[in-house]
Amino acid sequence: MSDKIDNVSVGKKANLFFDGKCVSHSVFFPDGSRKTVGVVLPDSKLTFNVGTPELMEICGGTCQVKIAGESAFKTYAEGSSFNVAANGSFDIHTGDDAVHYVCSFG
């Protein structure tokens, strides 16, 4: 997992979710595709509903994630990733540190 994204444009306006507990910015690629780069604040327990398939890459911190249909939470840390199916959802719990992520769509 690279620590930077080259040759992109970044949206100036932040995407705010859950009263600011999750903040991201859209990153636009020359081919028209988009990712988001964001952070989930410490001590958050959030549920995300997704329309399209998502790949969540954890770039910093550690979190507990339970994807819809799974029976238990799993731990994800820097360098790991997880997939969420279209029209699915996932619960994410953060601990004492923020969790930094990159989300790819489709």
Image (cartoon, grey):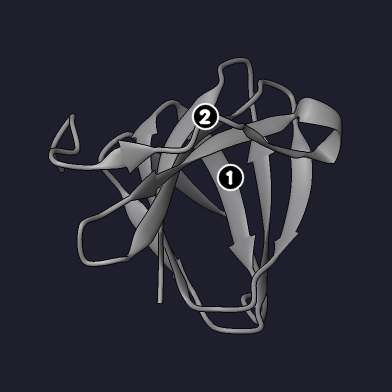
Query: Which residue is at 65% across, 48% downward?
Result: 92
Nearer the observer, disc 2 or disc 1?
2
Q: Dot 1 corresponds to which residue?
A: 64
How many residues crowd around disc 2 within 10 Å: few (fewer than 14), some, or many (20 or more)? few
Q: Name the residue nearer the viewer: 17 or 70.
A: 17
Rendered location of residue 61, percent (x, y): 44, 26
The quarter of the image holding the C terminus is bottom left
Q: Name the residue nearer the viewer: 13 or 97.
A: 13
Q: Is residue 22 above or below residue 51?
A: above
Rendered location of residue 74, percent (x, y): 52, 55
Rendered location of residue 68, percent (x, y): 67, 75
Secondary structure under the numbered disc 1 in the rendered image: strand
Do we see residue 6 in this rendering? yes
Q: Quadrant of residue 14?
A: top right
The numbered dot on residue 12 is 2
The numbered dot on residue 40 is none
Do we see residue 73 in this rendering? no
Number of numbered discs visible in the structure rendering: 2
C-alpha separation, residue under disc 2 versus residue under disc 1: 29 Å
Q: Amino acid at mark 1?
A: Gln
